[in-house]
Amino acid sequence: MSSGVAAAPRAKKLVRSPSGLRMVPGASAPRSPFGLVATVCFLSPAIPRLSWELRERECPRCMQCDAKFDFITRKHHCRRCGKCFCDRCCSQKVPLRRMCFVDPVRQCAECALVSHREAEFYDRQLKVLLSGATFTVTFGNSEKSETMVCRLSNNQRCLILDGDSHCEIEVAHISTVQVLTEGFAPGEKDTHTYSVLESQPASKGGNARATGMFLQYTVPGTEGEAQLKLTAGEDANTSRRQATAWLVAMHKAAKLLYESRDQ
């Protein structure tokens, strides 16, 4: 006897590709905005993406040291950028979670450095964002604020704010992130703001401590942009420390999304 309940689609599936095993979202599963599309190969502006067979014919030399490929000097490709290299120029195996690879994969030296930095985000900052923190939240130009818990959704697509009210903001719709910091040396302003999406940070802050954040984002079906302000509590307690760690993690996430636009 049928229960009448359709089986839920698998959120992820294991795929064997020429580049290695990948755990990718199912066809109907939402994709994380932090993910990158797996590349095949980049050889020339005229042919931005090439099939594996064409790549083998059109790439006779290492794209780093210009060594000619032969029976002894074998051809390899970087799983991140897709370019062709010899073993010496593409020998590092580094985790590449943004492309859903299960195991560490071969990458060129330049891409390996980027992937190492991103591994810290997945190992540390992402867990902080998923756990959430408590903030005083002000929407738009309102004079009223409320205490809310802000966290990243499990599918990494939305910021969820829960308090007396409920709000969800799609990460992909966030256009600007500005972090407020304090703790500068005497004579400098005690609150500093820098943007991470439109421009480079105005200052690395040194010993500065994150105290709050402005977010600008678009709301589907409306014109213009909405904004909100997150402010960490004033007490130097566990809640304040969690909020500060969450702000730092959100800054890392915004920077990751900004840099990935050129990848």
Image: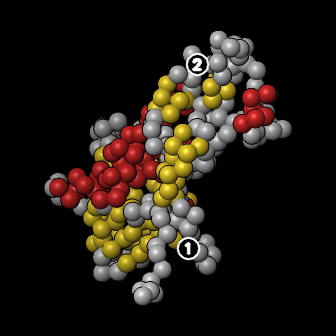
Secondary structure beneath label 2: loop
Given residues 122 and 86, the one toward you in this image is: 86
Whole-percent x and y of residue 94? 46, 32
Which picture quadrant has residue 187? top left
In the image, residue 122 above or below residue 145: above
Q: Earlier in the sequence, mark 1 or mark 2?
A: 2
Which residue does the image show at 34% across and 58% down from the upper left?
130
Against 125, is 29 above or below? Answer: below
User: Residue drawn 40% across and 53% down?
Assistant: 250
Give percent across and percent down for residue 87.
Answer: 58, 18
Pick the residue in front: 168 or 137.
Answer: 168
Report helix, strand or loop for mark 1.
Answer: loop
Residue 240: % across, % down: 22, 56
Q: Which mark is residue 87?
A: 2
Badge 2, how many Cα within 10 Å: few under 14, some, many 20+? some
Q: Nearer the viewer, residue 115 or 259?
A: 115
Label 1–label 2 contact, CB within 8 A: no
Q: How many marks?
A: 2
Report the side of 226 relative to 251 (left or right): right
Q: Which label is found at residue 23?
A: none
Closer-to-camera residue (22/199): 22
Residue type at tag 1: Val
Residue at the spot of label 1? 219
Image x and y of residue 136, in percent = 30, 68
Q: Is residue 221 left or right of residue 98?
A: right
Amino acid type assigned to the residue bearing label 2 in the image: Asp
Give the vertical position of 64 relative to 160 (above or below).
Answer: above
Q: Residue at x 58, y 64 (%)?
A: 27
Name the quadrant of the N terminus: bottom left
Few, some or many C-alpha atoms within 10 Å of disc 1 (few <14, some 14-19, many ≥20)? Answer: some
